[in-house]
Image (cartoon, rainbow, N blue to C red):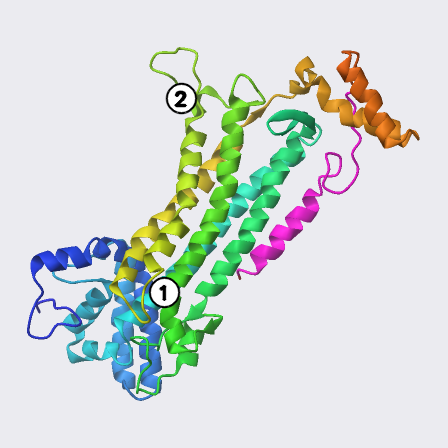
Amino acid sequence: MKPSKLWSKDFEPDKMIERFTVGNDRELDLRLARYDVQGSLAHIKMLESIGLLTADELEKLTVELRRIAEVIENGDFRIEEGIEDVHSQVEFMLTDRLGDIGKKIHSGRSRNDQVLVDLKLFMRDELKTIAASVNNTFESFQRLSEQYKDVLMPGYTHLQVAMPSSFGLWFGAYAESLVDDMEMLVAAYNIANQNPLGSAAGYGSSFPLDREMTTRELHFATMHYNVVAAQMSRGKTERAVAMAIGSIASTLGHFAMDVCMFMCQNFGFISFPDEYTTGSSIMPHKKNPDVFEIMRGKCNRLQSVVNEINLLTANLPLGYNRDLQLLKDIVFPATTEIKDCLDMCTFMLEHIRVNRDIIDDPRYDYLFTVEDVNRLALSGVPFREAYKTVGMQVQHGEYKPNRSVHHTHPGSIGNLCNDKIRLKMQKVMERLN
């Protein structure tokens, strides 16, 4: 049987037109193959329930779709030459094996809602995988925060020495920042977790489709009820996912910058074993933080993904437009890249070395001026008088720091609240189930 397009009539498009409009969709669609089969299994079960398939036809289609699913899971699924996309390939395989029964699978469905359901299922799974990687990185930050909670480091404002911080505070800050990022991810997940199947080309169907049934079968939390709204979610869902990815990337990129700066000899706060750094072709002493420079660059680029989606979809008219096909080429690589960055960050955190004695350097003496002002204020000296006293000591070169730090309020050096932060993350993760 010769492959044909789902929309073919008595003509074929010019080859140059086909190459331009299909682009690399066949390669990208391989990531959707398992979800296309999942959607089709739910769809045919619903078609049988409303009388558009017999029980025998449903059984035969189900058996063949499950065989195709095995081919996909084994990595042997291919979209053949002359077949436009994953939907066409699956239907071609069914028709090749079952004859006219295979042609019935598209009843009550358009490629518009078919790709939408594939994408929703794909993004739902990708977000869960990203969340697992975020949680791993979170756990690494929390472990390091506890491990180094008593090791002081300089804190900065305006990149000037400011007040005492600690490595526990630094690592813990990134842990809690990831909790905020997870809130964004959960919001994107909720947008993805809605069933568009049955919206067809965007205006519904004259078949009595049971959309509640397919929503249950595909384990969606709810459906996109309005069929036009379902089609409008193409682009909106990807934008939400990109915003979540961008939020995570912002946190990772910020941390990568800290690492690059703190590894510099002028700081010397942290280091890594030689094998986790790179060298110079001309300077024998160099140990470069290439991993974190690449991570910083990737994360900066990931934060631009949402803008790319905005520009692609900003002026589209109502209904499906082929421009939306290009969203795959933007979102698919982004989901892979953010996971790679998270996994690399987690890996590098396992090998980070902390300079426990950095605070003893005299250049950090002025970190403790606020501590000494506060000690005077606690002893009964008015704050402004205490501030002036210490300020004059600094001005006249007479200041001698007391390097002891006593912070007790929630979230401070002496009270990191890592247990509370862990609980926040647990509650967010539970909302993905």
**186 up-or-down from 344: above or below:** below
Q: Quadrant of the N terminus?
A: bottom left
Which residue position holds label 2? 278
Q: Which residues are magenta?
A: 403-432
Horizontal relation, residue 152 to residue 196: left or right: right
What x and y, as percent, mark residue 34?
A: 32, 61
Q: What's the amino acid at mark 1?
A: Arg
Q: Nearer the viewer, mark 2 or mark 1?
A: 1
Numbered label attached to residue 234: 1
Query: Which residue is painted at 34% across and 79% down in the image?
Result: 45
**124 up-or-down from 367: above or below:** below
The answer to whether marks 2 and 1 mark residues whose Cβ atoms lie closer than 8 Å is no
What x and y, as percent, mark residue 15?
A: 8, 58
Query: Which residue is painted at 43% across and 78% down in the image?
Result: 225
**389 up-or-down from 343: above or below:** above
Query: Which residue is painted at 61% across and 53% down in the image?
Result: 426
